[in-house]
Image (spheres, rainbow, N blue to C red):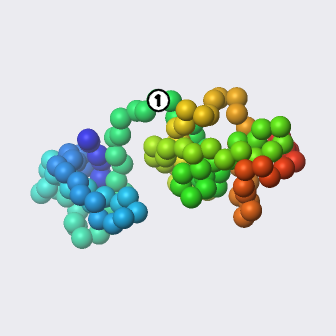
């Protein structure tokens, strides 16, 4: 895996993944990279912007993160009634309010309508009124 580190002065440094290890139960990883030109690297003990070049994935559906429940479910709207569907979270894209979860499920198709509004009492069988913008 390749990555690019953005230094304080705006210069970019190419990095190469050397390995990884889990650091918590939440799925976090500690990544170890090699810097191709370490002498020109800015101060190393600061936070820097890092862009990873990840392989492209197919058969995923991007949804707003607020459509994802417990990091493993979405609700499909079938004839104005909610139905819970288990999904696999492949990753995320974007940041802040534009963050989307990339999900995959054999139970989803392109035409399915998903609940995008966060409901505290979402449950299968709950009747809903659908508003399309």
Q: Residue furthest left?
A: 39
Count of residue discs: 1
Residue topped by disc 1: 58
**Where in the figure is residue 61, as x and y percent of width and height?**
57, 36
Q: In this view, does 42 lie above or below 131?
A: below
Compared to residue 35, the image places residue 22 above or below, namely below
Q: Residue at 34% across / 46% down in the picture?
A: 52
Q: Which image quadrant is residue 39 in?
A: bottom left
Instruction: Kindly tell me whether residue 71 is visible in this rendering.
Output: yes
Q: Position of residue 13 (x, y in %)?
A: 24, 49
Name, please, the residue furthest toward the bottom: 45
Q: Is residue 6 above or below residue 90?
A: below
Among the 4 quarters of the image, the one containing residue 47: bottom left
Split into 4 quadrants, where in the image is the C terminus?
Answer: top right
Q: In this view, does 42 lie to the left or right of 74?
A: left
Q: How crowded is mark 1: few (under 14 residues within 10 Å), some or many (20 or more)?
A: few
Q: In this view, does 109 lie to the left or right of 49?
A: right
Residue lying at the far front of the rendered structure:
125
In this rendering, does residue 93 appear at all?
Answer: no
Q: Residue 58: image x %, image y %? A: 46, 29
Seen at 65% across and 29% down, the residue is 110
In this rendered view, identify the residue nearer to me: 8 or 79: 79
- Which one is nearer the viewer's eye here, 32 or 67? 67
Q: Identify the residue at image location x=87%, y=48%.
A: 129
Question: Mark 1: which secondary structure?
Answer: loop
The quarter of the rendered structure image containing the N terminus is: top left
Closer-to-camera residue (45/63): 63
């Amino acid at each position: 895996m390749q990555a690019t580190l953005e230094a304080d002065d705006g210069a970019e440094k190419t990095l190469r993944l050397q390995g990884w290890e889990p650091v918590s139960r939440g799925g976090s990883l500690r990544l170890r990279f090699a810097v191709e030109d370490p002498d020109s690297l800015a101060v190393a003990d600061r936070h820097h912007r890092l862009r990873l070049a990840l392989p492209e994935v197919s058969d995923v559906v991007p949804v707003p993160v607020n459509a994802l429940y417990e990091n493993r479910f979405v609700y499909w709207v079938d004839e104005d009634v909610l139905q819970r569907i288990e999904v696999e979270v492949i990753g995320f894209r974007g940041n802040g309010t534009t963050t989307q979860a990339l999900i995959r499920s054999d139970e989803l198709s392109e035409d399915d309508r998903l609940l995008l509004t966060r409901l505290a009492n979402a449950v299968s069988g709950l009747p809903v009124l659908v508003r399309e913008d």
